[in-house]
Image (cartoon, rainbow, N blue to C red):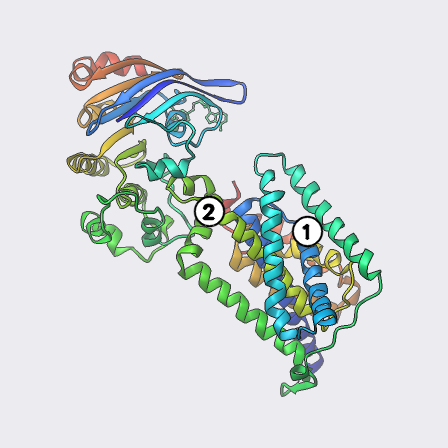
Amino acid sequence: MLSVHGVSARYGEAQVLTDVTLDVQQGEIVTLVGRNGAGKTTLLRCLMGLHRSMSGRVELDGVDITRRSSHQRARLGLGYVPDDRGIYASLSVEENLLLPPVVDERAWSMDQVYEAFPVLADRRRQTGTHLSGGEQQMLSIARVLRTGARMLLADEPTEGLSPLLVQQIGDIFRSVREHGITVLLIEQNLHFASSLADRHHLIARGQVVESLDNSEVKEREHELLEYLGI
Amino acid sequence: MDALLQQIFTGLVSGSFYALLALGLSVIFGMLGVVNFAHGAFYMLGAFGAVTVLDTIGVSFWLALVVVPLVLAVLGMVLERTLVRRLTSLDPLYNFLLTFGLALILQDLVRLKYGVSSQPYSRPDLLQGSFNLGLFTYPRYQVFVLVFSIVVSVAVWLVLSHTRIGMIVRASTERPELTSALGVNVGRWVTPVFGFGVALAGLAGVLAAPMRAVNSEMGGDLIIVIFAVVVIGGLGSVFGSVAAGYLIGMLTAVGNFYVPALSQSLVFILMALVLLLRPAGLFGREESMS
Ligand SMILES: Nc1ncnc2c1ncn2[C@@H]1O[C@H](COP(=O)(O)OP(=O)(O)OP(=O)(O)O)[C@@H](O)[C@H]1O
Ligand SMILES: [Mg+2]
C-alpha cells in the first residue's frame, strides 16, 4: 500500500534520515520503533509532505506521491495524527472533526464518530484544547477517520497517557484495522506495539536497522528493549 | 463631564478606523504570515478612490462604499498572486522591503497625479448636520462611521465564527502546515483573504474621505498606530484587533483630554506595557506565539 524508497532527510546541515526503505501492506498495522531523536517523526513528516528537504521516493498504491503537496496526499487517503495531537484551540471539538474534507465514501458519519467516541459527543461545543490529553488523542484519531482516510499515520498516540487510556487507544486501532484501514504507528512502548501490530521497523540514528514480524519481536523482546534503550 | 463623554465618543470614531484596518492587517498576518506595511497605502487609495470616482463619473459616496473596496480587493489579489506570494519562503526582511516599497510606490503615484494638497470630499446629503445624543450633539456622519464599522466588524466576526470558510481561516491562521496535512488547500484561500484584508482597508479609506484630510500621506501616519493596535490586541487574533481598535481609540482620546502632551505617545506606552505583561497581546493565545 505504502512504499518508501531510499528516503533521506536533513535539517539544515544535520542529516536526520539516511536511505530509509520500508513498506506497509494493505490492512496491516506496522510500527516504527526507536529511541528519542531517531528520526521517526521526521519520517512521518516526509510521508505527509511536510518536510521539504528530503530525497527518495514515496509511493501510495503504486502512485508516486513524492512531488504531491500535503493536502493532495491527505486527499489521496493519508490521515495524519501528529505527535502533539494537533487539536486547534480556535476550533470547537465539532469543528475540529469537520475541518478536514471527506476524501472517500468509507468516511465515518458524525453519528458514527460520536457513537464510537461518546466523550466527544458530550463535549462537541467545547474548545478543542479544553479536552484532556486522552480525549484530544481520540479527537485527533476520530478526525481522520471521519475523512475516510485509507491509511493512518499516527505519531506516538499513546505518549503520556495512563495505562487505561493506552488500552483504549489500542482497542481503537484494532477496530480501525477491522474497518480495513491500514496503520503506520510510531511507538516507543514495545510491549504495546507487539500487542497490536503485524510488523515492526526499528529505527536508529535515521536508519531502518531491522524489520521484524511480530512473533520475532515477542521472542526477542528483552534483547530489543535493551538495544533500543527504552 | 459632557466634554469628556464627547471626547470618548470621538475616540470611538477614531477607533472605528483602527478596528477596520487592524482587522484586515490581522487576518492577512494570520493567514499569510505577512506583515503588510502597505496597508496604510491601501487605506489612502480607498479615500482617493472615492474622490476619483466622484470627480470623473459622478459615483456617489454610497456607491463608492461598495465599488471602491471591490476594486481594491481585485488589486490586492493581483498583488498577492504576482508579488506577495513570493515572500513565503524568503527571509522576513523581504516582507518589509516588498510591502514597504509598495506603500512608497503607491503614495508617489498618487502624489504624481494629485500633488500634496488635500482633496475635498463632502459628506453625503443624508448625513449632513448633527444628531442630538442627549448629553451632547454629534455630527451625523461620525455617528454613521461608528455604527457602520461596528456592523462590518460584527459581520466579519459572524462569518469567521459560523461558516466553513471562517473555520478554514481560523485553522490556517493557527496551524497552516497541519491544516494542509489534513487535506485543506490552504493556498487557495490565501489570495481571497489578502484581497479581503485590502478591501477592508479600502472601505476604511472611503469612510475617511468625508471627515479626514485626503492626501497621499494619510495612510503613513495611521499605519504605525495600527501596528500598535494589532500588537496590543494580539497578533493574529481577529477579535483582539477589533476590540483593541475601539479600546485604543477611546483611551487615546481620554488621555488626550487629561494630558494632551501624551496624545501621540500614549498608544506606544500602552503597547510596551502589554508586551511586558502579556506578550501574546490582550486577546492573543500564548501558544500561537511559537
Ligand atoms: N526543527 C528541527 N530542527 C533541527 N533539528 C531537528 C528539528 N526537529 C528534529 N530535529 C532533530 O532531528 C532528529 C530526529 O528528530 P525526530 O523528531 O524525527 O525524532 P523522533 O524519533 O521522532 O524522536 P522522539 O521520539 O523524541 O519524538 C533529532 O536529532 C532532532 O534533534
Ligand atoms: Mg517524534
Residue that label 2 marks: B172
Is residue A115 positioned above or below B261 on the image?
above
Q: Position of residue A24 (x, y in %)?
A: 25, 24
The three-letter amino acid code for the residue at tag 1 is Ala
Q: Is residue B231 visible?
A: no
Q: Amino acid at mark 2?
A: Ser
Q: Is residue B95 visible?
A: yes
Left or right? Give the position of B103 relative to A62.
right
In the structure shown, which secondary structural element does the residue marked by tag 2 occupy?
helix
**Residue for point 79% across, 68% down:** B119
At horizontal 37% and vertical 17% (from top left) the residue drawn is A20
Say which mark, if any, is on residue B38: 1
Q: Quadrant location of residue B110?
A: bottom right
Return the chain for callout 2.
Answer: B
Give the Cα separation between the discs numbered 1 and 2. Answer: 22 Å
Q: Position of residue B157 (x, y in %)?
A: 48, 63
